[in-house]
Image (cartoon, rainbow, N blue to C red):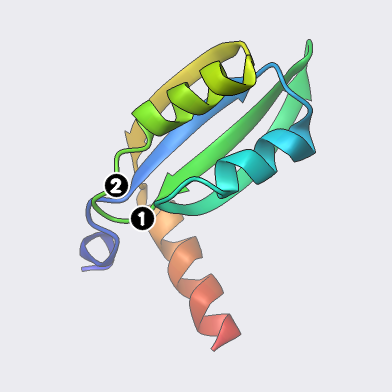
Amino acid sequence: ALRQRLHGRQVLAVQLAAEPSAAQAALQALPGIAAVTLRGQAEGYAAFEVEARPGTDLRDPVFRLAVARQWALRELSSRSASLEDVFIQLTTHEDQA
């Protein structure tokens, strides 16, 4: 039941050769973004977890953003939201209510 509440939510692992705060702001400005989390930086790359709203595929928009900003794109991989992701999402929103 918990997984069904976030059914269809896509989570991307993204690594960009960009200044982290600029990249995070640009990613958050894309339509369909639910959340962008900086996961770390190494070797000039910033690693993000990018979560889409249900029914949204962000792979093409993220790729086009990287090309437009001339940021090297080291990783762009997709995964479904895990049960842990669902739990965190639900408890975070309920705490804010």
Q: Which mark is residue 56?
A: 2
Residue kind at label 2, given as amino acid type:
Thr
**Which residue is pictured at 62% across the width and 40% down the height?**
26
Find numbered disc 1 in the image and state the secondary structure of the residue it sits on: loop
Percent x, y of residue 22: 74, 36
Residue 63: which quarter of the image?
top left
- Give how far apart the Cα atoms at labels 2 and 1 are: 6 Å
Check if mark 2's residue and mark 1's residue have beta carbons within 8 Å: yes
Percent x, y of residue 59: 37, 29
In this view, 17 is above or below 39: above
> Do we see residue 97 in this rendering?
yes
Residue corresponding to mark 1: 53
Q: Residue furthest front?
A: 68
Find numbered disc 2 in the image and state the secondary structure of the residue it sits on: loop
Tell me if 41 is positioned left or right of 79 in this view.
right
**Which residue is pictured at 56% across the width and 49% down the height?**
29
Percent x, y of residue 75: 51, 16
Residue 46: which quarter of the image?
top right
